[in-house]
Amino acid sequence: MCGIFGYFNRQLPDVDEALFDRMGRSLSHRGPNGRGKTSAQGVGIGNERLSIIDPEGGGQPFLSDDDGIALVQNGEIYNYVELAQELKHAGVACRTHSDTEVLLRLYEREGIRFVNRLNGMFAIAIHDRREGALYLIRDRMGVKPLYIHDDSRRLLFGSEIKALLAAGVRAELNPEAIHHYLTFNYVPAPMTAFKGIRHLEPGHWMRVTTAGTEVRRWWDLAAVHEADWDERAARECFLELLDDAVRLRMRSDVPFGAFLSGGLDSSSVVSRMVRHQPTPVQTFTIGFEEPRFDESPFAREAADRFATHHHMERVSMDMTDLWPLTLYHCDQPHGDASFMPYLQVSRAAARNVTMVLTGDGGDELFGGYQKYAAFFAQSPAHIPGAAFGRAYHDFQSLFTEAAKLDLYAPAFRGATEGMDSFDLTRKLLAEVQHLDTLNQALYLDCMQLLPGNNLVKPDRMPMAASLEARSPFMDVRMVEFAFSLPGHFKVRQGETRYLYKRAVEPLLGPGLTHRTKQMFTVPIGEWFRTKLRPLVRGVLLSSRAADRGLFDPAQVLRILDAHQDGSRNFTREIRALVALELWFRIFLDSPGVGPAPTFETLALGGLLETDHGA
């Protein structure tokens, strides 16, 4: 786990060491164990390293024997042991035990096709000096981020947008991204909230030369087709895949553990970990005083069941003071309050281990959210195919297109004229018309929600604490298996994760298996009516916010009044609007990338009352 960064100068084949160092320093939280870099022919690639595999011999970049190839990566290749054995049998011996060296040797033998052999989470940069080419590669599901700025003279890349801003890219607003943010509650890839900065899409690689840039999709989830599964065989396959995905992700040369909430996904992962480790697995959770949001009793139940070495840290529920910090580490506006407790549990784990396994991704693959049951309360067959996409899109939209137009100030309404966020949904749905409608909905969430929000969280929040997070559910074999299952194996008669629960119930017991899903969040909507009332009004009704020209202050006031007098629940909308204004103040109102922000440094400290006693 690391951060990678670099540049490709098309016109001036020089080395900019000062730029290189600024980019690296901006990512130092991702890799506190060392910085490595190399440059030649106007191309530079670098790495900030968090040592997990082969701490002594795994320093990056890795160079070929003739110095013709240089390679860095962010992430982990879980099947690197098997790949190294294949190389050895072919007469190619790796000199270290590093998974990154395996990548170099595979590329030497197979060229860019080597990516198809990888089971892992990764963003990879390869400078092939023989071709005069820079390759940038992103893993199948977008677990690891990779951002790009290209002004035709120079291409810059980095694991976080901060690296590009540190290199001098001007922080300018992308109005289209904000328009879509207000629909999805996050900025959907490949666009970002910054004009001129793009996200390399999951399952794609890019080849950069002085002649131009080529982008190709090297893996396509839409190519998977549903199969005629026997239920018992499908349950057995699920358990076998989960077990092996967990086993591979336990490969580590540093101490590791697991996040354990007592929910279905984290408990299932831990149930497999204990099979492959003779000593107790270290597990981590945080607890709150408020029973409605406190999962620690369920985490303790799971920990006792699997005899783990359990760490529970009780923290204050009021962690609103972390809001600016989580946005800073995300680089972009996110309307998800669960980033704050995720940062807290990451910090707690990082005091004991360097890597954790998580349950992220299980909901999107197997239909775990209640929204699926709610939307498909009637048989999917009753939803006409042509109407399904728009109906599902509108069902989960934060603001509808009409609501956004009402919210916008005249200037911003003009800047976004003709934009419809459903165009993004329609494009994705067109790729999976061969799937049933539930799997189409899950495909949307895997292509939009995961890389846009739900995989951002287990990358950015643990990385903010210099902790690596690995999710077995993102194993390519598990992902492809999930989309080979018909929808009725996932949501049946209102029950979410139908087959998954029946597969793991003998391991977890009925209590952990069938407990009501509890979101890992805080009651921020309630606080908007009480102790956070001064903050949200002070932020959203400020002259500073109005001067941006995005929103009609009267419409913002209407939303706040309706929520705060209890006549409507606008929690999600207010959360997204506050997050957006905080993002403006962190990234666009200040020149360059400053230090990690607080409400005080944003001149908002007087509006916030938090309890720091717990």
Image (cartoon, grey):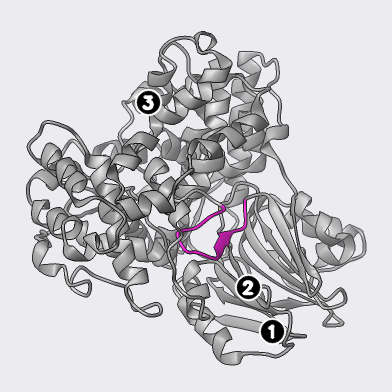
Dot 2 or dot 3, earlier in sequence: 2
Q: Does 249 sit left or right of 572 as displayed? A: right
Q: Residues within 10 Å of mark 3 (few under 14, many from 20)?
A: some
Question: Picture quarter containing residue 347?
Answer: bottom left
In x, y percent, where is residue 246? 57, 44
Q: Which of the 4 image quarters holds residue 196?
A: bottom right
Q: Alpha-carbon neighbours of circle 1 within 10 Å: few (<14), some, or many (≥20)?
A: many
**Label at residue 370:** 3
**Amino acid at dot 1:** Thr
591, above or below 495, in the image? below
Mark 2–mark 1 distance (CA, rounded to whole Å): 22 Å
Task: Give the crowd class for mark 2: few <14, some 14-19, many >=20 residues within 10 Å.
Answer: few
Can I make out residue 197 in this image?
yes
Separation (CA) of disc 2 from disc 3: 44 Å
Going from N to C along the chain, the mark reached first, 2 or 1, is 1
On screen, residue 583 versus residue 223, left or right, reads: left
Q: Amino acid at mark 3?
A: Gln
**Foreground label between 2 and 1:** 2
Residue 420 x/y as whole percent:
48, 39
Q: Could you tell me which secondary element the residue under label 3 belongs to?
A: helix
Location of residue 354 with respect to 456 vertically, above or below = below
Identify the residue at image location x=32%, y=65%: 584
The amino acid type of the residue labelled 2 equals Asp
2 and 3 marks in contact (CB < 8 Å): no
First of labels 3, 1 by sequence position: 1
The segment highlighted magenta reads 190-201
- Give the residue at mark 1: 38
SS at badge 1: strand
The tag on residue 151 is 2
Q: Nearer the viewer, residue 273 or 451?
A: 451
Q: Quadrant of residue 508?
A: top left
